[in-house]
Amino acid sequence: MNSMRRVVVTGIGIVSPLGIGARTHWENLIGGKVAVRRIAAFDPGGFPSQIAGEVPAFKITDFVPKSYRKATKVMARDIELAVVAADDAFKDANIQSRAYTDKPSIPAGRFGCNIGAGLISAELNELTAAMHVAREGNKLDLKKWGQDGMGQLTPLWLLKYLPNMLACHVTIVHELKGPSNTITCADASSHLAIGEAFRTIQRGKADLAICGGAESKVNPMGLMRQCLVKRVNTESNESPERAVRPFDSGAAGTCIGEGGGLLILEEYESAKNRGAKIYAELVGFGASQDTHNITDPSPTGHSYGSAIRKAMTEAKVSPAGVGCLVPHGLGIASHDRAEIAGLRLALGDALEKVPLAPIKAQIGNLAAGCGVDAATAVLSLHSGAIPPAVNSNKSSSIERLNMQPTARETKFDVAITSVYSLGGQNAALVFRRV
């Protein structure tokens, strides 16, 4: 790895339940604001869990060039979140792409795009109208669906719901022609996408890349799936601000959310030459697969800890050198215990000393949008502040963890962010102060 090129973060774009834009998200996160509340996007009355982390209202046409506004008609919610986050990242990096000028300041062929995505849920009103004409009594008739039902859908309907359309729209809007890919590995998608972009730049196949992920589960289908696998808190509908309690002895489940976090990675010399603001250097990436169970991580945390250890080994970072760790911290008791076991395997006796910053209590689980976790780790390192561990008042009986209910100001040199997914994928990233 020593012969490979150095990679730094020069732009951050965030759209989260705490606000539109990295600055707003960070200020509200550090301030301890909780954005989990009763769902407003649809009536959740018939669901056992009725709360979520929802992104504040926005108009997607405000975030694309005038010439591209027609295309917003074929953007599902997940795509919109990615496009908004990308706009924030490009502006933050002070990069003039095709979205802002006829004379871009970037080499399009050397600018990659890796964006993680989830299973995009189709809008029920569209499907209902089509299925209504294809029913035989109370059943869907597949012959009628082929003859009449599908004709009720717009010809471009499918383009709204393909996972690769997040990266597709971002690359078209900003005219990026470098290596591009989409990763769909649930909660691990963003970190795996960032890791792939990292490797691409290290190897010299690109000089810049926008990477991370976005997703919205704030829809009936997304909520129902999480209810069926019993991951969400069904006891705190009347007190949503206390619903998600990561690593807390009273943890009773997570809640759905929506958002996106994208980083602009850049080759170090390129960033220096253009006088870019450098947030941090990405120095380690690790990934692994847990085959224990499709809905639960291994209680041993072995695979999760392995991903973190791999990233730390590449970064040449010892457990004692970690200044902040943004864990996955879903607030699901069995998952949290497994995660703590993995952290213990990776950090050893240093676990009790490493400051943890679980942020899901404030925003919910953004799934493929966990690029927000990675962006938060970078912002924490850059600003010298560790976000609060909201709702984690009663520490787990398994371990004594270094968490505080209020933000901490402290300068440190290394931040780690780690995630695991429903399905067993694990990923970790290590950032170092430049």
Image: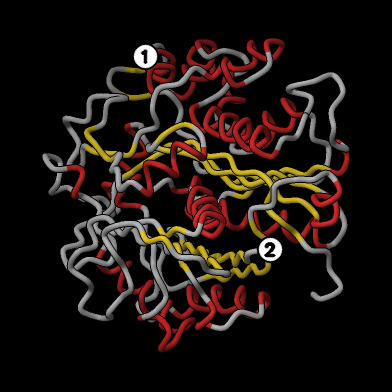
Tag in front: 2 or 1: 2
Residue located beneath label 2 in the image: 434
Of labels 2 and 1, earlier in sequence is: 1
Q: Residues within 10 Å of mark 2 (few under 14, many from 20)?
A: few
Asked which secondary structure carries label 2, the reply is loop
Q: Position of residue 284 (x, y in %)?
A: 65, 69
Look at the image and tell me in which quarter the C terminus lies: bottom right
Look at the image and tell me in which quarter the N terminus lies: bottom right
Residue 132, numbered label? 1
Residue under the point 64% across and 54% down? 194
Residue under the point 47% across and 67% down? 324
* Amino acid residing under circle 2: Val
Where residue 239 sits, quadrant-wise, is top left
Work out how far the residue at label 2 is from the one at label 1, CA to CA, in angstroms.
59 Å
Residue under the point 42% across and 45% down? 366
Q: Residues within 10 Å of mark 1 (few under 14, many from 20)?
A: some
Q: Position of residue 33 (x, y in %)?
A: 29, 43
* Amino acid residing under circle 1: His
Residue under the point 24% across and 38% down? 51
Q: Position of residue 17 (x, y in %)?
A: 38, 37
Where residue 414 sits, quadrant-wise, is bottom right
Q: Nearer the viewer, residue 20 or 141?
A: 20
Residue 239, numbered label? none
